[in-house]
């Protein structure tokens, strides 16, 4: 679909285009998949998404396929080892947040599905936006602010309102494909 009209942010990089065309904005309801996306969005802070996308398989390998039970038990020695791994972003705070966020995830899962916890902020249904230009798309919303506060209260970090809104877009909680994009109606 090389001649399809897409959202301008994905450019022409084949990996980015495939991500836009196949993943971004598709609703995800699996709790562990949502944890993976949230951790990856936190790793993106200060970087471009394509950087994280290129390292996603490295993250999966380094972080035991985002198994929350394993990540929650990572020792300080394991975190130090991750600091030496060139297949992921080697930022100490972001690496330490993996263990912390997995622990917070497991605590939430004691009482309810993580998916339910997150999707409650959009009443369980994707929000259908009708943006015509990228300039109209907000960096954060009242829902992302509320979700960010709830995640922080639960013990997560690297979950500010802007990171959370990017996460909400990626996992289909909001459909922010432009109305001119071929994916808008599909999502």
Image: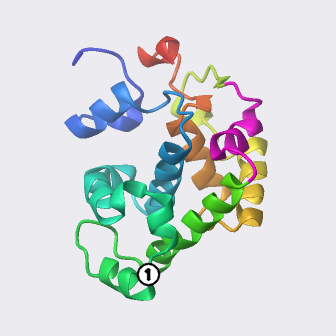
Residue stretch rendered in magenta on the structure: 111-125
Tell whether 18 sits left or right of 146: left
- Residue at disc 1, secondary structure: helix
Decide which of 5, 21 is in the foreground and name it.
21
Decide which of 130, 127 is in the foreground and name it.
127
In the image, is residue 96 above or below residue 66? below
Horizontal and vertical percent for residue 37? 48, 48
Horizontal and vertical percent for residue 115? 63, 41
In the image, is residue 40 above or below residue 1? below
Residue 168 occupies quadrant? top right
Q: Residue shown at 74%/33% (left/top)? A: 122
Q: Residue shown at 57%/33% (left/top)? A: 29
Would you name the residue on which mark 1 appears?
92
Which SS type dominates the magenta stretch? helix
In the image, is residue 186 above or below residue 49? above
Residue 138 occupies quadrant? top right
Residue 94 in the magenta stretch? The answer is no
In the image, is residue 20 above or below residue 55? above
Q: Quadrant of the N terminus?
A: top left
Q: Residue shown at 21%/19% (left/top)? A: 2
Residue 113 in the magenta stretch? The answer is yes
């Amino acid at each position: 679909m090389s001649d399809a009209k897409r959202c301008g942010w994905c450019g022409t990089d084949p990996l980015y285009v495939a991500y836009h065309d196949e993943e971004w904005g598709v609703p995800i309801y699996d709790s562990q998949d949502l944890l993976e996306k949230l951790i990856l969005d936190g790793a993106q802070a200060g970087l471009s998404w394509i950087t994280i996308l290129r390292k996603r398989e490295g993250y999966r390998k380094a972080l035991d396929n985002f198994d929350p039970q394993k990540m929650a038990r990572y020792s300080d020695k394991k975190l130090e080892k991750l600091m030496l791994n060139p297949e992921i972003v080697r930022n100490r705070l972001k690496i330490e947040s993996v263990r912390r966020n997995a622990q917070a995830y497991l605590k939430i899962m004691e009482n309810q599905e993580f998916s339910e916890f997150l999707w409650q902020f959009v009443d369980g249904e994707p929000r259908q936006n009708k943006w015509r230009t990228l300039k109209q798309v907000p960096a954060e919303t009242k829902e992302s602010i509320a979700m960010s506060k709830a995640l922080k209260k639960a013990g997560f970090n690297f979950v500010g309102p802007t990171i959370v809104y990017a996460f909400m877009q990626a996992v289909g909680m909001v459909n922010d494909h432009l109305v001119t994009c071929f994916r808008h109606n599909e999502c």
